[in-house]
Amino acid sequence: MTDDHLSNTEPEAAFQERVDNEIKIEPKDWMPEGYRRNLIRQISQHAHSEVIGMQPEGNWITRAPTLKRKMILLAKVQDEAGHGLYLYSAAETLGVTREDMIGALHEGHAKYASIFNYPTLTWADVGVIGWLVDSAAIVNQISLQRTSYGPYSRAMIRICKEESFHQRQGFEILMPLASGSLEQKAMAQDAMNRWWWPTLMMFGPHDSESVHGAKSMQWKIKRKSNDELRQDFIDQTVPQAEYLGLAIPDPDLKWNEERGHYDFGEIDWDEFRTVVSGNGLCNRERLERHSRAHREGEWVREAMRACEEKKRTA
Ligand code: FAQ
């Protein structure tokens, strides 16, 4: 049954009225099947992104330049695991199991953010992930705090509090590099050059190409469109790059007085499609590592199930 068909029915009209009146939808409320499925898709993909997103930075935990930096990075990467757990829990309230969600990821049916398929070649990449990638995530997640589904909205409120620490730790890694030796500055600029465009891709295709965008906006799952969020991110990030003294690798980036926003160049959508379809630089490595960790953790899940069973039959 299509979403359009459901939109003509009475419960759908009452549902839409609740959404329009900013009343949160809770797990036990009636909801159109399309709303439920779309939420499961987005929330589970968001959860996968948080967990797969641990890998690029995790790659530097053993090589952080000081003990203090290592502790901060460890805490940051652990936070991402926690975000994944909040989000899997929020998705479970919609009647899907965690096994199903992880299975969909491993079988390639569920996506995760394209950004995490790029390699972290230097320590400056860790700074740029914290600064740019977390900033992009925050811009999106701040608007998702007002999403119409209660459990997702509440998870976002908690997550945003932690993300702002992540953004600062990234900026704090880059500040000494950007004002350091010539080699350090070059390393920071090289990281900026490699991560800028993939970060812009995080917001997804242009609104005109977005498959789920219109319905998600109508249902207030999404509160801002892909292009609106991308513009917000660029407008807030350019002054930060200027403060750091890092050049943004886009010759078309220019303040547009009339629009009150920055104009910017076109994203390489072929690259985006390549990465999203599983053929980016690190897609296979990321998924294999996740699958391996999942298999190796089977004994923990088995022990947990045995414990639960024992409690139930005691
Ligand atoms: N990568 O119709 P739309 C983080 C897919 S969290 C991969 O426009 P939608 C924290 C899309 O799924 C980062 N796939 O889709 C952190 C759909 O495919 P499907 C994650 C993408 O949902 C920081 C198709 O293209 N954040 O970074 C991407 O309306 C540092 C058509 O697209 C979230 O997930 C992409 N970039 O809008 C962790 C936020 N873009 O499902 C560690 C929640 C699009 O039909 C370190 N999600 N696709 O097979 C959202 O806001 C939305 O899902 C969008 C996409 C905006 C990502």
Image (cartoon, rainbow, N blue to C red):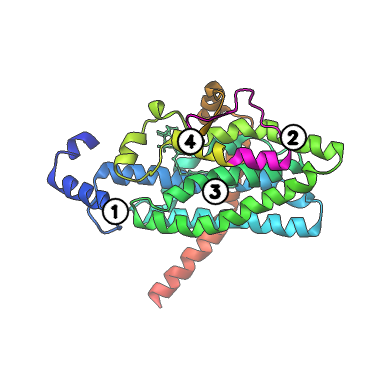
- Who's the residue at 60% across and 49% down the image? 293
Query: Hey, what amino acid is under mark 4?
Result: Gly
Query: Hey, what amino acid is under mark 3?
Result: Glu
Tell me where the magenta segment starts and ends, as one range. 237-259
Separation of residues labelled 1 and 4 (CA atoms): 35 Å
Residue 195, image x, y percentages: 65, 34
In the rendered image, which residue does mark 2 sit on? 189
Mark toward the viewer: 4 or 2:
2
Query: Hey, what amino acid is under mark 1?
Result: Glu
Query: Hey, what amino acid is under mark 2?
Result: Gln
Q: Is mark 3 within 8 Å of ligand 1?
A: yes
In the rendered image, which residue does mark 1 sit on? 22
Q: Is residue 142 above or below residue 186?
A: below
Q: Can residue 112 be seen in this view?
A: no
The kind of secondary structure element at disc 3 is: helix
Q: Which mark is residue 108?
A: 4
